[in-house]
Image (cartoon, rainbow, N blue to C red):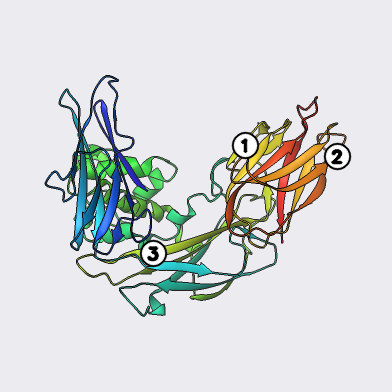
Amino acid sequence: VDTAQVGFRNKVSTLTSETKVASLYHTEGLAPLTVQFTSQGSKDLDNDDKINYQWLFDGEYVGSEERNPSHTFTENGVYHVVLKVNDQGGKTAMDSLTVRVGNTPPEVKIASAHNKSFFWEGEPFAYAVEVNDPEDGNVNTQDIQVYFNYNPEPTSLPANNPTGHQEENMLANVMPGSALIANSDCKACHTVDQVSVGPAYKQVALRYKDNSNAVSQLAQKVINGGAGNWGTTHVMSAHPQISTDDAQKMVSYILTLAVPEQQLTSLPQEGEVKFTQHDVEEEPNGQYTLMATYTDKGGNKVGPLSGREVVTLRNARVNASYNDGEAGFSRWRYTLGNGGHKSYVMLKNVDLSGIKNFSFDYASQNRDGVIEVRIDSQEGQVISSTPYEPTGEWNKSQRVKATLDKPIQGRHDLYFMAIQPQQPNEEIIKLNYIIFEK
């Protein structure tokens, strides 16, 4: 779902879209294209105030005053949909979203018999890229781009998203934002690596590369214009004609320029990659990313659209502190300890294809218990359960192996949960590593 927010004094407006035809969560497709819009998130900070909604599906005329309307686009074209919200005091806020009718994004798939979440030491990953585009028909394989890189530290702190932002950082020139910039007036004041009227894009990327809010902040700067961040001699013009969605794509492209080019390796449409750049001890959260992209030829009043798939692979020996969620554990930077009954570690969107066993590197001073693996929620199905014994000391580790009850395909959220219902059941486990085994 595409989401953007615009603040105006005491008002915040949010516009999201979800297309009900073609591929879900996209705003591109063939006519007739029905899109379900929602104003969810729009609000007024005055608790007793009332908000009125106006939807301009063509960017000019009010087509609906409902909170969450649907609209069918019957003719090909590019539509800049605008949501206006008004309160009783006359304050107004707007947000916009671009809908492209007349072309569907190409479907890109990285086909592989291998697991798509993990790599194992010494084992290559074989792949073949498949592309389907209804409008283009036969796809020229020379137009398929495949890239591979390694990121030794994709997150600055543990317990963040283990897939990091590799997808956005892989390669600038295959992102839709680059085409938007090329067709705008940006090049009159900016270049990629040389200071012109304004700063070079690479300067901007380096300044904001560690700012998690950079996309939204800079997108508003593109739309509203202004000066100050790079001096006051030249003021950047406002670009109110650019939608929030497009501005964010443009900024996302610019931010990718902070990635050193030498990290990227171009690959053929079919082949295999080897995992040779990581250091197991020094880079426990290092990740390899394989990305395939294809940009179609456009048509029917809509310019070219890009499709891509990204496969991010981490070491099958996972430091438990690099997780997507945890509860009940004490944390000492990269160490989880003293977890009690029902303490857990959660990993999101894990491909279980081909996984047969788990091994757990743990310690427990004087408590025994069970490590359960549940899928999709804390109360989800238990797919593995294995008992563990005390190790005698917190700094003395042991390993236990757990077998999956039955093979499981596809991606799931995994909850690794310590269980000991009998009291005393505080401080029953220190979880060091989770090892995925084929």
Q: Horizontally, is 117 left or right of 22 in the view?
A: right
Q: Residue at x 37, y 78 (%)?
A: 139
- Residue closer to the observer: 129 or 284: 129
**What amino acid is at disc 1?**
Glu
- Quick one: label 3 or label 1, which is nearer the N terminus? 3
Helix or strand or loop: what does disc 2 sit on?
Answer: loop
Residue 141 position, x and y percent, is 41, 79
Q: Which residue position holds label 1?
A: 326
Q: Which residue position holds label 2?
A: 389
Q: Horizontally, is 271 left or right of 429 in the view?
A: left
Residue 117 position, x and y percent, is 60, 57
Q: Residue at x 21, y 48 (%)?
A: 81
Whether residues under marks 3 and 1 lie with C-beta atoms below 8 angstroms apart, the answer is no
Whether residues under marks 2 and 3 lie with C-beta atoms below 8 angstroms apart, the answer is no
- Asked whether residue 152 is in view, the answer is no
- Asked whether residue 35 is in view, the answer is yes
- Based on the displayed image, in which of its 4 quarters is residue 237 positioned? top left
Q: Residue at x 70, y 39 (%)?
A: 417
Whether residues under marks 1 and 2 lie with C-beta atoms below 8 angstroms apart, the answer is no
**What amino acid is at disc 2?**
Glu
Q: Which residue position holds label 3?
A: 307
Residue 285 position, x and y percent, is 61, 50
- Residue closer to the observer: 352 or 233: 352
Residue 235 position, x and y percent, is 19, 42
Q: Residue at x 19, y 49 (%)?
A: 57
Helix or strand or loop: what does disc 3 sit on?
Answer: strand
